[in-house]
Image: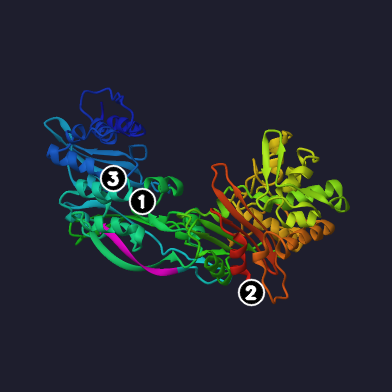
Amino acid sequence: MSKGKRAGSLLACTGLLAGMVSGCGFGFAEPSPFGTVKDFLIAWQVGNYTAAAGHTTGDGVTVAAALRDVKPELNAASLKLSLTDGRIQQAGNDADAEFSVTVDLGDNGDPWKYGGQMHLRRINGTWKIVWSPSVIHPLLAEGQRLTVVTTLQKRAMILDAHGATLLQNVKTDVFGVYPGSLRDPDTTLKAVASLTGLDRDRLILRVKSAPPQEFLPLVTLTEQPAHRRKIAALKLVEGIVLDPKSEQIQPKMAAEFLGTLGPATVEKLQQVGAPFQPGDTIGETGLQLTFQRRLAGIPSVTVMAQDPRGDRKTTLGTWPGKADPQPIQTTIDPVVQRKAEAALATLKVPASMVVIAPSSGFVQAVANHWTGGRDLALEAQYPPGMTFGIITAEALQKKTGQQNLQNVPCPATAAFGDKTVINRTGGHGSLSFENAFGLSCATTLAKLGAALDPGALTQEANRFGIGKDWGLWPIQAFTGQVPGTSVAGAKALDMVGQGGVLMSPIAMAMVSAAISSGNWRPPTLITSPALPVTIQSQPIDAITENALAALMRQGVVAGSAKPAAVRGSQSLVYGISDTVQDAGGKPVSWFVGYRGSYAIAIAIEGREDAAVIAHKFLQGF
């Protein structure tokens, strides 16, 4: 065959993917460099590094190790090699081949693509690839390795309603390693993983891909009591280096709502996804986790070739962060938030409070106390007891009219099918519905509620947004649950906020805000980014509003919420309180009410007088 025809056959065959196993039929016995190139690329891609090394002029062990190290040095998810866009040029016993490399760096971004080159020589009739690190990448020199540097951007702040930061500087302990100085990386990283919950295998890959001589942060912990043992243990791990810093990462207030930062464990990485890596400091809870990508932006990634000491560095590829960090602006009013937290501070049991501006629906305070990091103010699911009587009272007034709710009985107990309703304050004979409500007469509401249609309670609850989608996603909040039932016992318990009725403090605060303003408005927790509106405001009938306000005023004047009263004030306090047992028998104490510009709901896991806590909060405004 002529030289021209051979060259034409070679060029035709370069259109094949390197992943094809079948060879190209050239029609001549003379060996072709294409076969060597194809077999080398296939072996490298599938991980048969020894076979790939056999097609080169280099030492088999050395070449196999160099090829094997490419993926861990890049912490790559995949490596694909192809001759699709390449070509082979032959001149006698020498040839040059071009091929393409596609590397998935695992950051959910564009893959790294570059053109590879190799020189071949025919030795004793067999084509061999003349080995050089440049086969891996054209700019990779002898003695160099690949490294990946991920640079996190400066995290944005979480702001209050006035645009000031809600975060503060705290001393942190940053634990990390100098990858090239680790005597036993596996043992060191196993210990770190055991203490922190980070994934050991991913930690090892990250350390292998990092520049050997540069400090690589792995764990950042704030110096607080919960971290003391972990900090002490990490200090004893061989190879771990401590780099103390001061960073603005800890909430000044509303800690459970704003959330905390911590090391990127496997569980958290599944939630926030790439390009974050094990050991990165990311949101652990609250808004810090929910808005991780907005607050942190997208890190930049740089691939470099460098020698072990870092004296020679060559940038091979750079991917700037595609999104800059953006702040979150909340509706939290720092004065209101501090007062709410101070009101709960003396309690020795878990408690939570939500404060809302009735005229706007803006949530001014989300306070949690002794909740173990849980945001119970937004997410708790408690039976609300007689504080839910506001909804029952509205349904009864629509059914019977205000004039027919006089001289109602308030026995100490009342049986309904297989259930018994008990008054917390005992029996009170016959009295007006207003007085019965103020005294939290559960038996009164249960008896009157027997005449309501099964769906009436659910229908009225929906008018106050209960059980609806408030459009807060991705913020988690429990909007309430009111099942409709015709079974006498279950129906009676639902009427008095027990049985299947469950509420969160924010849901009950929204009910209180609606009565205060005459409109139910969906709550707003953040103003930037603006969340889509999924539910509209609903006006409350003026007659109903006045009647419910009168009931809540009675609760403070002469009823169960009397301790909430604030004397010597032009702004009256309205409210209702109760203590009810949850499904597990645990008491939950409630206050739901409002005064002036503040609608509040308080839930306490214990037999406490929530009206007293309401008084502590409301006085002084």
How crowded pointer 1 is (Cα within 10 Å; few <14, some 14-19, many 20+) is rated as many
The residue wearing badge 3 is 200
Identify the amino acid type marked 3: Arg
Q: Which residues are magenta?
A: 168-176
- Where, by quadrant of the figure, is residue 343 drawn? bottom right
Q: Is residue 130 visible?
A: no
* Location of residue 30 in the rendering, given as x and y in whole percent from the top left corner: 20, 26
Q: Nearer the viewer, mark 1 or mark 2?
A: 2
Identify the amino acid type marked 2: Phe
How crowded pointer 2 is (Cα within 10 Å; few <14, some 14-19, many 20+) is rated as few
Residue 174 among those drawn in magenta: yes
> Do residues under tags 2 and 3 come within 8 Å of each other at their CB atoms?
no
Figure coloring: rainbow
How crowded pointer 3 is (Cα within 10 Å; few <14, some 14-19, many 20+) is rated as many
* Location of residue 120 in the rendering, given as x and y in whole percent from the top left corner: 20, 39
> What quarter of the picture does the C terminus occupy?
bottom right
Give the residue furthest to the right: 403
Q: Is residue 157 visible?
A: yes
* Location of residue 329 in the rendering, given as x and y in whole percent from the top left corner: 56, 65
Residue 461 among those drawn in magenta: no
> What quarter of the picture does the N terminus occupy?
top left
**Gap between marks 3 and 1 measured at Cα:** 12 Å
The residue wearing badge 2 is 621
**In this rendering, is residue 391 above or below 583?**
below
Q: What's the mark number on residue 251?
A: none
Of residues 225 and 148, the one nearer the viewer is 225
Q: Is residue 313 left or right of residue 535?
A: left
The residue wearing badge 1 is 277
Q: Considering the numbered disc 3 on the image, is that residue within a helix, a strand or a loop? A: helix
Identify the amino acid type marked 1: Gln
